[in-house]
Structure formats: C-alpha cells, structure tokens
Image: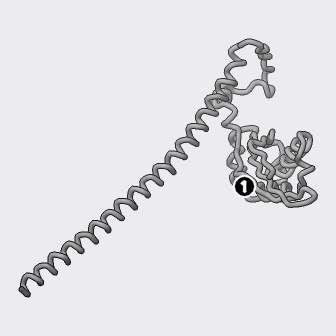
C-alpha cells in the first residue's frame, strides 16, 4: 500500500513538473511573439517613412519635369546667359533641387501668446548654393541650432501668426545662420512644418 501511495505521489510530482515546464515554454513563446510583432511594426514604420520620402521625391521630380516638357500653360524657358547664374552645369540639374537642401532636426520651443505659454514646432530646411556647403553646415550645426533656438524662443504668437510674420522669421533665421557660416552660402530658408499648440 505504501508503494502505491509513493508511486501516485511521484506521478503527481512529474505531472506538476510537466505543467510548470509547459507554462514556462508557453510564456517564452508568447514573449517571443510579442517581441517579433513589435520589431515588425518598428521596421514597417521605417519602410513607410522611406516610401513616403521616395514618393515625395518622385512627385517633386514629376512636377519639375512637367514645366520643362512644355506642358499646358508652361512658359518657355529663357536661354541662360553664358557664364552667369543661369549657366548651371547639366550635372547639377540632373542631381535635382534636393541635392542642395539641408534639413535641420525639428525645433520645439515655448512661445508666449499674451495669456499663456504655447508650443511652437518648426522644421526648417536650408537651400544651399552648392552641395559642398553641406560639410560647413555639418561642422557648425551646434551654433546654427543654438542661434535658431534663441531666435524662436524670443518670438510671441503674434510675431509668427500671419504670413508676413513667417516671412520675416525666415529672413531672421537666414541672418542668424549667416553669423555662423560665411554669408551667401545659404540662399533660402524653408518651413516644412510649422505648428503652434
């Protein structure tokens, strides 16, 4: 009788051990599944961003090519003067306007609207005169970001609310950047995102 009780206890112990093992294996498989889904979603978002950038570049290329093709309403292109700014080399034209664009990371600052603090988020892209200016911008990125942050922080909602204020801000940003690098290297400042909350 004692042998039967001992065998029953051993059988129950083995069954309990197997249950624990199945629970541990199930938890490990579940964790691996969750991590796999998270990794897939993270990788999928990067692909969407790359795809959106590729679509935007394709749309810009199509828009730029349409006037050159002499489409409906397109004005004829003037003949470039020899040796002037209009006589850009064909290789520069093939590279497209995005080769001369330098995107800065977004700026998020507090601005005052007269009653309370608000957030201003601005994404700025700089049009360089030549792609060679990129190396200078990379080398002076900290002073450039600092001067733009200080400039944006000094603004109020009324300063940036209308189109005229935004255009004035572009000119001020260009002036602040020209203090960090030699003037004339940046031709234009573009706002690609401008949000006040």
Percent across and percent down for residue 34 are 43, 57
Task: Pick out the residue farthest to the front.
Answer: 1
User: Mark 1 = which residue?
Assistant: 141
Percent across and percent down for residue 48 are 55, 41
Task: Name the residue rendered at 86%, 55% in the picture.
Answer: 151
Colouring convention used in this rendered image of the protein:
one colour
Task: Pick out the residue farthest to the bottom.
Answer: 2
Which quadrant: the N terminus?
A: bottom left
Q: Residue 24, relative to residue 177: is it above or below?
A: below
Q: Please tell me whether mark 1 sits on a helix, a strand or a loop.
A: helix
> In the figure, residue 54 lies in which quadrant?
top right
Q: Nearer the viewer, residue 101 or 130?
A: 101
- How many numbered circles are shown? 1
Apparent side of residue 164 relative to residue 24 in the rendered image (left or right): right
Task: Name the residue rendered at 70%, 40% in the picture.
Answer: 101
Q: Residue 96, relative to residue 15: is it above or below?
A: above
Q: Residue 24, relative to residue 141: is it above or below?
A: below
Q: Nearer the viewer, residue 181 or 41?
A: 41
Task: Name the residue rendered at 79%, 14% in the picture.
Answer: 75
Q: Residue 144, relative to residue 52: is it above or below?
A: below
Apparent side of residue 197 relative to residue 94 in the rendered image (left or right): right
Would you call the spot at circle 1 few (<14 residues within 10 Å), some (14-19), or many (20 or more)?
A: some
> In the figure, residue 62 lies in which quadrant?
top right
Percent across and percent down for residue 10 are 15, 79
Task: Name the residue rendered at 54%, 46% in the picture.
Answer: 46
Apparent side of residue 31 relative to residue 107 in the rendered image (left or right): left
Percent across and percent down for residue 122 are 77, 49
């Amino acid at each position: 009788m004692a042998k039967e009780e001992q065998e029953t206890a051993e059988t129950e112990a083995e069954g309990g051990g197997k249950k624990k093992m199945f629970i541990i294996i199930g938890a490990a498989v579940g964790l691996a599944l969750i991590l796999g889904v998270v990794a897939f979603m993270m990788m999928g978002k990067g692909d969407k961003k790359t795809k959106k950038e590729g679509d935007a570049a394709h749309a810009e290329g199509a828009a730029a090519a349409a006037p050159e093709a002499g489409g409906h309403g397109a004005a004829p292109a003037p003949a470039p003067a020899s040796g002037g700014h209009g006589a850009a080399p064909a290789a520069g034209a093939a590279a497209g306007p995005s080769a001369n664009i330098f995107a800065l990371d977004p700026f998020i600052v507090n601005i005052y609207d007269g009653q309370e603090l608000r957030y201003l988020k601005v994404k700025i892209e700089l049009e360089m005169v030549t792609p060679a200016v990129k190396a200078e911008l990379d080398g002076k990125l900290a002073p450039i970001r600092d001067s733009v942050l200080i400039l944006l922080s000094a603004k109020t909602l009324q300063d940036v609310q209308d189109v005229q204020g935004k255009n004035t801000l572009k000119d001020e940003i260009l002036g602040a950047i020209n203090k960090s690098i030699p003037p004339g290297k940046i031709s234009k400042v573009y706002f690609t995102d401008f949000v006040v909350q």
